[in-house]
Image (cartoon, rainbow, N blue to C red):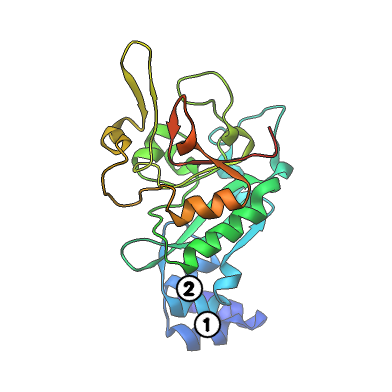
Amino acid sequence: MLAVLLAALTLTGWGSRAAAATGGDTTYVALVEWQAGKTVTAEAVAAFGGVDKCFAAEPIPDGVWARMQGKSYKKNPYVGRNDLRHIRALHWDYDNQIHIGEMVCNKQIAGRVVRILRRLYDAKYPIQRMLLPDVYGADDETQMRDNNSSSFCYRAIGGSKKLSKHARGLAVDINTLYNPYYKDRANGTRYVQPATAARYCDRTGDFPYKIDHQDLCFRLFTEAGFRWGGDWTTCKDYQHFEFIEYE
C-alpha cells in the first residue's frame, strides 16, 4: 500500500522525498490519511513536510462531517458546519512517541487552540488521546473514561438540560479521566464525571496528567482567554477550558 501511495504522490513531488526520508516507513501513510490515534516517527513527520504542516485548522472535510452526523453533530439552530473547524495536531504521551490527533472546535477559537496544541507538543506535554467524540458514539462518559481530549460535541452539561459550551465548540477538555468534573449535592452525595474518576477529585495527590495552577496547559489556555473549570466554586471541572469572550 505504501509503495502505491508513494508512486501516486510522486506526481506532486512528495513521493521521492517521502521514500528517501522514511525508507518505506508505513506511518507516513497515517499522516497522509490523517489517522488520529496512530503513532508516527519523526522521519515520517519530516517527509510529510515537517511539524508545522501537522498543525492546522481547516474547514470540516466531507469525511469528518459524515462521521459526525447523529453523533457529535445534531441538527440545531445554533451551530453549523461553517461555524466549525477541523484541527490537525500531533501530541506526545508518556511513551515518548508522536501521536496523530484531531479535534473539532468553533472557528472563533480554532487558531488559538492550534497554537496552544503546538506549544504543548514542543514541550512534550503528555496528552494520551485526541480523538473525535464520534469514535465513542459521542458518549461523553465513555470518552472521558478513556482519557480522551476533545472540544465540539452538541450536548448538554452533565446532569442538566443546559447546553454545554462544547455544544458550540467553545470549550476544550484535556486528559479527562485524571481531571474530572464533580459537584457536591445538598444531600451530601457527589456527582462525578467520569464515574470512574472519583479518586482524582482529591487534587492533593500526585498522579499523571494532573492539571493545576502550575501546569503548562493551564497557563497556555488561560493566557489565550480561556476560563479553567478548576477555578469554579459551585463545582469543579479540572479538564475544562472554555472561551470567555462569547458568553
Which residue is painted at 41% across and 52% down in the image? 129
Q: Looking at this view, is 186 or 90 the one in front?
A: 186
Question: How dense is the environment of label 1, judged by Cα within 10 Å: few (below 14), some, or many (20 and up)?
Answer: many
Q: Which mark is residue 28?
A: 2
Q: Is residue 61 visible?
A: no
Which residue is painted at 54% across and 64% down in the image? 118
- Residue 245 in picture, x, y percent from top left: 69, 39
Identify residue for label 1: 18
Which residue is painted at 56% across and 81% down in the image? 7
Q: Looking at this view, is 131 or 66 the one in front?
A: 131
Question: How dense is the environment of label 2, judged by Cα within 10 Å: few (below 14), some, or many (20 and up)?
Answer: many
Q: Which mark is residue 36?
A: none
Position of 17 relative to 239 (above/below): below
The answer to whether residue 180 is left or right of residue 52 is left
Kind of residue indicated by mark 2:
Tyr
Q: Is residue 191 visible?
A: yes
- Helix, strand or loop status at disc 2: helix
Kind of residue indicated by mark 1:
Ala
Q: Looking at this view, is 99 or 10 the one in front?
A: 99
- Residue 44 in picture, x, y percent from top left: 47, 76
- Quarter containing the C terminus: top right
Cβ atoms at labels 1 and 2 below 8 Å apart: yes
Q: Earlier in the sequence, mark 1 or mark 2?
A: 1
- The quarter holding residue 153 reads top right
- Residue 224 in picture, x, y percent from top left: 62, 52
- The quarter holding residue 75 reads top right
Extreme residue in the top direction: 187
Which residue is painted at 66% across and 48% down in the image? 109
